[in-house]
Amino acid sequence: MNIIKEVAFDSPEYLKAVELRNEVLRKPLGLEFSKEELSEEFDSHHFVAMNDEDEVVACLVLKPISPQEVKMRQVAVKDTQRGKNLGSLMVQFSEVFAMDNGYELLTVHAREVAKGFYEKLEYTVEGDQFEEVGIPHFKFIKKLV
């Protein structure tokens, strides 16, 4: 059974989430996180799904953009946990958190391969496809109120 929770920036769970994000999102593109990139996450909300062995099996980051808008970033699910609805649960958990904290709009820059995932969760594409970290992305939005 997995438990989803918010964790503190620079905590042991946060560092495990960074490892997962690096493995799933960065290494396949030949990229790594810099200390500067990670230091900019101090003001974000960090969420993890942990299994019974205290392993981080999924994670995502919510970055406040304004008092009304929060941006979802770095959604990652461990390969062995894909197809078990964990990504959807993480996104829904973050949506409730965002609403509970007064945010009205959730945005995400999603890779082209994740387009169907976000459409299924009722996110709407805004604008044209663009390139980020060297691969095609779309901006998705979801009004929370």
Image (spheres, rainbow, N blue to C red):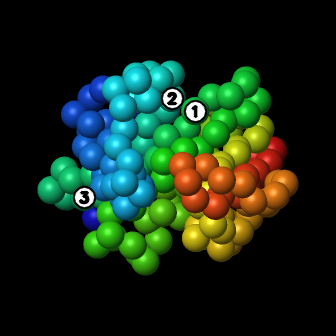
Above-or-below relation of 29 to 68 = below
Look at mark 1 in the image and give the residue it sits on.
63
Look at mark 3 in the image and give the residue it sits on.
51
Q: Nearer the viewer, residue 46 or 101?
A: 46
Residue shown at 65% from the left, 73% from the top: 116
Residue shown at 27% from the left, 37% from the top: 15
- Judge whether residue 29 can be spotted in this image: yes
3D distance between C-alphas at marks 1 and 2: 5 Å
Which of the two discs, 2 and 3, sits closer to the camera? 2
Q: Label 2 near label 1: C-beta < 8 Å?
A: yes
Which of the two discs, 1 and 3, sits closer to the camera? 1
Q: Secondary structure at mark 1?
A: strand
Mark closer to the chain start, 2 or 3? 2
Residue pushed farthest bottom? 83
**Label at residue 109:** none
**Label at residue 44:** 2
- Judge whether residue 3 can be spotted in this image: no
Residue type at mark 1 is Lys
Left or right relative to 144: residue 80 = left
Q: Hey, which quadrant is residue 35 in on the image?
A: top left
Q: Nearer the viewer, residue 126 or 137?
A: 137
Residue shown at 43% from the left, 37% from the top: 46
Q: Hey, which quadrant is residue 6 in on the image?
A: top left
Mark closer to the chain start, 1 or 3? 3
Residue type at mark 2 is Ser
